[in-house]
Amino acid sequence: MAKETKYIFVTGGVLSGLGKGIFAASLGNILKSRGFSVNLQKCDPYLNVDAGTLNPGEHGEVFVTDDGAETDLDIGHYERFIDRNLTKASSVMSGKIYTEVLEDERKGKYLGKTVQVIPHITNKIQKFIVEAGKGVDIHIVEIGGTVGDYEGLHFIEAIRQMRRKVGVENVLYAHLVYLPFLETSKELKTKPAQSSVRDLLALGIQAQIIGCRAEHDIQQEHLKKIALFSDVDERAVVPLPTIRSVYEVPTNLEKFGLGDFVCQKLNLPIKKRTSNGWEKYLDNLAHAEGEVKIGLIAKYMSNEDTYKSVNEAIQAAAIHNKKMAKIVWIDAEKVEKHGTKVLDELDGIIIPGGFGNRGTEGKILACKYAREKNIPYLGLCLGMQVAVIEFARNVLNYKDANSAEFDRDSKHDVIHIMPEQRTCLDEENFGATMRLGAFPCLLAKGSKSYTLYGQDKISERHRHRYEFNNDYRKDFTKAGLMIVGTSPNNHLVEVIELPLHPFFVGVQFHPEFKSRPDRPHPLFDGFIKACLNQS
Ligand code: GLN
């Protein structure tokens, strides 16, 4: 195994949903700011092969990488925190591990041996980790779930073994815990945290760094107590109270000397930290005055994380313009049933990506409202398709216009599956059957998008089956809906605009994935500016 990469394994205990992803990403951020090359990887216990078939209402958004992997939303945090485009290697789910092991078994690669969780599954996990860590100074691996979860044990055992395999001086274990607050005695309790460190120890791993999440003030005495009972260096027990912005976490960790500690423990030179470039963002955030009200017309209303990157992209653009975004989630089905009154207070409307029929008619109504009332509109993937359908119905007068996804019998399938893409319609096989990942796009000079990007050649990430139907190009452009972005061979429509509208842009891709806190995506920035102009 490669000796040169250092590994930090991040586990979590007490509760799920503590922000392990942010903790791991923040470690990555502080180490990158010290001049080290860093990679991040998430190991998820689910038996899914990738996140592509997971319900975003339940699990959070499916984040797409440049190389077309459908991953867990934590990969989005990683990209935003280390400002690096990651690959499919950064997301490993149990299903992927098991699939490879079972394929190897079928091919007879185990030479008659009994195939077992240990060593075959654990070895495969290590192979994925080592491959992802190749070539970087520090590879940070987050283990999903909570320590002690039955389904995560193979990952814990794999990372336990790695300490010997790659050298004890090359591995650090960081554990994130939660300190509950007892309202009756007004006390922060450390016992669950101690127990969780012990759960990890029972599996053979001694935590070396402990991150303490709490919603109340954490005192020195709490940290000391945890250090003593967990046998962890006091310097390495760091508080992670709830703060205004997750982008303050890295500075917070540095304040407690965690960067120096990690470098010392991993035998790395202690380099001075340079700026991570977020000062301006945090300063704008602190001084943001007033808000811009953005309506997100969506199908899922259940989970904050469902449109995580869209939320992040809106907020980054708003803060860049020294405003806070108030993101108003609007249930598309409600618009369908009760009309567009709920849209009256909005400064701008976004329709994010989505699949399936539910709520689509409400989205089409919201889009019509934005077009007719000159409200800034940004359509993301499905949001572009909806804009095309709406225009076809209400301007071109193709009353039954639709996407083949929603109505296979429509005479005007303005959004359809291209003949050469028909294999995508294989109904038995839903995993990874889409146009996925980064594709180049050419923008028309003079268009709003071209002006915003400041260039004509762009690359953006896709995740969809359906496309604009080229048979209708002429009809649309004649009536004023312009096709301003296409694939380089002009075959696929990627961006549409209404030039006479203050801001009406639909994109077949997902620009939200490439937005960074300190570098908002140009389309989102342009959209927010238009919203501010309007309001
Ligand atoms: N459902 C649409 C398609 O598959 C849009 C997908 C999306 O918005 N990501 O083409």
Image (tube, rainbow, N blue to C red):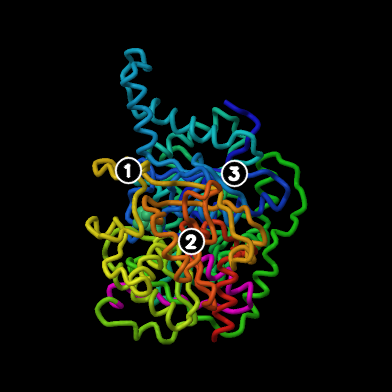
Up the image or down, 294 lies above or below 298; here it is below
**Which residue is depicted at the point 60% across and 76% down?**
529
The quadrant in which residue 502 appears is bottom right
**Helix, strand, or loop for circle 3?**
strand
Q: Is residue 137 left or right of residue 473?
A: right
**Helix, strand, or loop for circle 1?**
helix
Magenta region? 310-335
Q: Which residue is mark 2?
A: 507
Question: Is residue 297 magenta-colored?
Answer: no
**Which residue is depicted at the point 60% across and 74% down?**
319
Q: Look at the numbered disc 1 and say if its residue's Cβ is closer than 8 Å to ligand 1.
A: no
Q: Look at the numbered disc 2 and say if its residue's Cβ is closer than 8 Å to ligand 1.
A: no
Q: Amino acid at mark 1?
A: Arg
Quote the CA–CA distance across marks 1 and 2. 22 Å
Q: Quadrant of ligand 1?
A: bottom left
Mark 3 or mark 1, earlier in chain: 3
Asked if marks 2 and 3 touch (Cβ < 8 Å), the reply is: no
Q: Is residue 522 visible?
A: yes
Q: Which residue is mark 3?
A: 39
Q: Is residue 215 left or right of residue 456?
A: left
Neighbor class of circle 3 (other Cα within 10 Å; few <14, some 14-19, many 20+) is: many
Up the image or down, 289 lies above or below 475; here it is below
Up the image or down, 474 lies above or below 103; here it is below
Q: Is residue 231 visible?
A: no
Q: Which residue is mark 1?
A: 422
**Helix, strand, or loop for circle 2?**
strand
